[in-house]
Image (cartoon, rainbow, N blue to C red):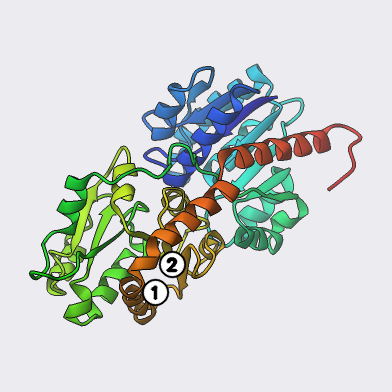
Amino acid sequence: MKLLFTNFHAGDGGGHTTYLIALARGLCGRHEVHVAAPPGSRLNREARRLPGVHVLDQPFPNGLGKLPARRRARHQLAAYLADHRFELVHVNGSADHRLVMAAARGLPRRPPIVLTKHNSKPMTGIGHAWRARAGTDGVIAVCDYVRRQVMASPYARCRVATVFNGVDIDRFAPRPADPALRQAWLAPDGAPGAPVPLLIGSNAGTSRYKGWMDLVEALGSLAPEWRDRLRVVLAGALPDEADRARIQALGLASHVHFAGLLDDVRPLVAALDAGFVLSWDVETISFACREMMAMEKPVLVSDYAGLPENVDEGRDGWVVPARNRQAIAAALRRLVEQRDSLPAMGFAARAHAEAAFGLDRFIDGTEAFYREVRLASLPGAAPA
């Protein structure tokens, strides 16, 4: 097939970029893969490094104040669609979805369009109803929670498949911790003779909705003898001044470490005793959670959206109510009490990842859905 992937993010793109790069890398040996992404975006840069993948510098301007820019972007994308006659276009957000629909209007025949829903936002309103009816042939849900959202939306009229996000379990394989890094993040040392603190952390970033401040507040609520047996490390942008001031006020400045934006999160994850992803908005299934589990780390997750679908409670992770700091504090105490069982839980997390999180399942499932949607779009095909 001749495939076009689109994504509107002009910057890092987070999970969208991780998702599309994995698909492009996995499918470019089987199909002709094109990527349309804003110039300077991480997706654009990383796609250009993939042999055989074609990249279009394509902006996706959004909003009434950008009508001239939208017009130019539509003309460029329309010409690209006409020149290449794609057999399927895979869109990943409202902005690129709208532009693809507008650019395809003048074509003799619109290519089938597949949408992946990457977030937990409601799919309501006239815009979604219009796109579902006029410009969507298939929808990929990245977890069961998202599938339920899709089936309760106007997109239920489309073909729908659940294809769980996959991670590179070979790249995110267990590895020894760097002793110097681990020691730096375990600082300061406890009292003489005290147990070495547990190091818990996350590679999910420091956006507020990721719930990391809920964990910090929960840590601050613990009695000193429990609090001092834990250290926290986070990968991501340095939080704002208000959050850093709150950490200071809680007396946790020496307990919480920020590793910054990392090109490679594996050394951080390797140093952990356990991970956490405590999101309360936007999140669906979390690449970060699956990466940590693949690296043999049990993970504490909130009960938000698809996060609980990652773990077997008590076997390779734990689930707590989102934003419930009392429950998070209790979970932190359990981690300390059960520290001897954490390695076995990590082995179970890796086994779970090997069985369910691999890229082959993700790529093959996506490819199979493309074929289903494409066949259904041919003249004379039976409706969904």
Q: Is residue 266 above or below residue 6?
A: below
The x and y percentages for residue 58 are 48, 28
Residue under the image location 60 percent in, 56 percent down? 143
**Rendering quarter of residue 126:** bottom right
Q: Residues within 10 Å of mark 1 (few under 14, many from 20)?
A: many
Q: Are marks 1 and 2 in contact (CB under 8 Å)?
A: yes
The x and y percentages for residue 184 are 15, 52
> 255 left or right of 377?
left
Does residue 131 appear in this view? yes
Question: Which residue occupies the foreground of this view, 185 or 220?
Answer: 185
Residue under the image location 39 percent in, 59 percent down? 343
Q: Secondary structure at mark 1?
A: loop
Q: Is residue 247 above or below residue 83?
A: below
User: Residue 17: which disc?
Assistant: none
Q: Is residue 201 above or below residue 170?
A: below
Q: Amino acid at mark 1?
A: Arg
The x and y percentages for residue 97 are 59, 41
Q: What is the distance, in whole Å, between disc 1 and disc 2 at their CAs? A: 7 Å
Q: Residues within 10 Å of mark 2 (few under 14, many from 20)?
A: some
User: Residue 280: which disc?
Assistant: 2
* Circle count: 2
> 316 left or right of 219?
right
Q: Quadrant of the N terminus?
A: top right
Question: Which residue occupies the foreground of this view, 127 or 347?
Answer: 347
Q: Amino acid at mark 2?
A: Trp
Q: Secondary structure at mark 2?
A: loop
The x and y percentages for residue 297 are 40, 55
Residue bearing the label numbered 1: 323
Question: Which residue occupies the foreground of this view, 381 or 215?
Answer: 215
Residue under the image location 19 percent in, 68 percent down? 195
